[in-house]
Image (cartoon, coloured by chain):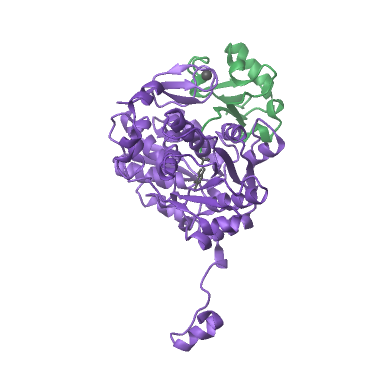
Chain colours: A purple, B green
Amino acid sequence: MSYLQGLRCQRCGHSLAPAPVHICPECLGPLELVYDFAAMKAELRRDAVEAGPPSMWRYRSLLPVGDAPVVDLGTGLTPLLRADNLGRALGLRNVYVKNDAVNPTSSFKDRPVGVAATLARAFGLDTLACASTGNLAASVAAHAARAGMRSVIFIPEDLEAAKITGTAVFGTNLIAVRGNYDAVNRLCAEAVDAYGWAFVNINLRPFYGEGSKTLAYETAEQLGWRAPDHVVAPIAGGSVLTRITAGFEELQRLGWIPETKVRVSGAQATGCNPVARAFAVGAERIQPVRPDTIAKSLAIGDPADGAYALAAIRRSGGACADVSDPEIVEGMRLLAETEGVFTETAGGVTVAVAKKLAHAGVLRPEETVVIYITGNGLKTLEALGAEVGPTATIAPRLEEIDRVLGSAAA
Amino acid sequence: MATVTAVRIRVPAPLRPLTGGQGEVTAEPGTLRDVIAALDAAYPGFKDRVLEPDGRVREFVNVFVNEEDIRFLQGPATELRAGDRVSILPAVAGG
Ligand SMILES: Cc1ncc(COP(=O)(O)O)c(C=O)c1O
Ligand SMILES: [Zn+2]
């Protein structure tokens, strides 16, 4: 039984039956999903969730999948780690890290793709496709393999080696485009009209986004069914931040967690900061930028949901900030050295922005803060370069250990 | 070989009901604003779907000229020459 009623234009309110479309035929505005919320509130119980599988699919009754067999790689229910060492470094007392680097394809993208792939199959589409900054690519290719579907994936040609190999290995049609992500995205926005494919982040975008709400659901459950005071999430297209926000709001409306005003703060790289810039200058429209940053997974100069992310941040009393490439590397190393979690550049952005916002007093010492770590460090080894490597290379002789470690050997 | 004298405009699927189903239409060179006005004369209602009443491009619409976002050019005042390709796209995609 699905509580999904249909699609509705976020701009003009026009309604449509569920279908693989993302654009209002009346005004070209973005479509969102509409649920029978009253029925959900009356019929759904959080103990049923607790008895569910140890994955994001324990929340399937809140997702728009109905009775469809889900494309399941075992995504989700990732660790929420209490991070006291990191908290001490940031001057915060209650910090948690949601480690979504440990998903099946090593990023949070398995959540939205799990939902989009399930719907693509339910709509009878046979080809899964996407425009990707790298993580989405691997996730779409893996889900297509698991579902026995064909896939066609478009990426900018300059991605990190692990993102290319870690996608191609799934036997997909991986197409590298000479251009940045925004060029790839424009090409795919044209391709969606020309081919009958399920572009997870274009024509299936209204469904895709819903999968990321499970980041909020899990966080609340793992905190003992309550929302944190403040979350920090990265922004590329702006979908994950807005869906995390919506996820907490929904649990409150369902009465599953107490009413809390969750402050939401966004993280970008200085080399691709359209939302942070709009936040800083008080603008409502996002001006696109030309990305130039080591955080390639966040290098979207024209974020589709940028205005929605900005509005969610402002409405919640959070902030949006950006950090330089050296600060991103510092953020990656800080998280690794304090908590044993190795994140990619996007996570470096998030940790470094958390540090910046803590110093600015936006993140307050007593708040329960959750930092969303959305990708895995093994995918962006290039960013660390030679800077992180062996402390020494020695001959296999005992005295060599003393020689290279000196007093540290004692 | 025929010389190219027109600007070519790619029409996104949701606007094709206005152009009788055509995915590509042509117009005489001029500013983007002129071209859209000409298309509105040929396909009534076209302009309102692309531009705000004040002449700015609508929030959920992106316009590209030869693959460049017009926000990096001169916006609706961008000059279009014979052979230029314009692509009009809904803004929501990507991630
Ligand atoms: C690791 C990682 N984190 C965060 C994001 C940002 O997600 P969104 O595009 O939903 O803002 C992306 C991808 O775009 C990503 O790959
Ligand atoms: Zn509409």
A99 vs B94, nearest the viewer: A99
**Residue at horizontal 46 percent and vertical 54 percent from the top:** A376
Quadrant where the N terminus of chain A sits is top left
- Against A167, residue A52 (above or below) is above
Q: Quadrant of residue A7?
A: top left
**Residue at horizontal 52 percent and vertical 39 percent from the top:** A241
**Apparent side of residue A338 relative to residue A54 in the rendered image (left or right):** right
Residue B30 placement (x, y as % from top left): 70, 23
**How many numbered discs?**
0
- Against A128, residue B11 (above or below) is above
Residue A90 placement (x, y as % from top left): 60, 55
A186 vs B5, nearest the viewer: A186
**Apparent side of residue A91 relative to residue A372 in the rendered image (left or right):** right
- Against A340, residue A219 (above or below) is above
**Apparent side of residue A184 relative to residue A310 in the rendered image (left or right):** left
A158 vs A218, nearest the viewer: A218
- Against A151, residue A35 (above or below) is above
Q: Is residue A323 visible?
A: no
A154 vs A356, nearest the viewer: A356
Q: Quadrant of residue A333?
A: bottom right
Residue B62 placement (x, y as % from top left): 59, 29
Q: Is residue A237 visible?
A: yes
Residue A20 placement (x, y as % from top left): 40, 27
Q: Quadrant of residue A325?
A: bottom right
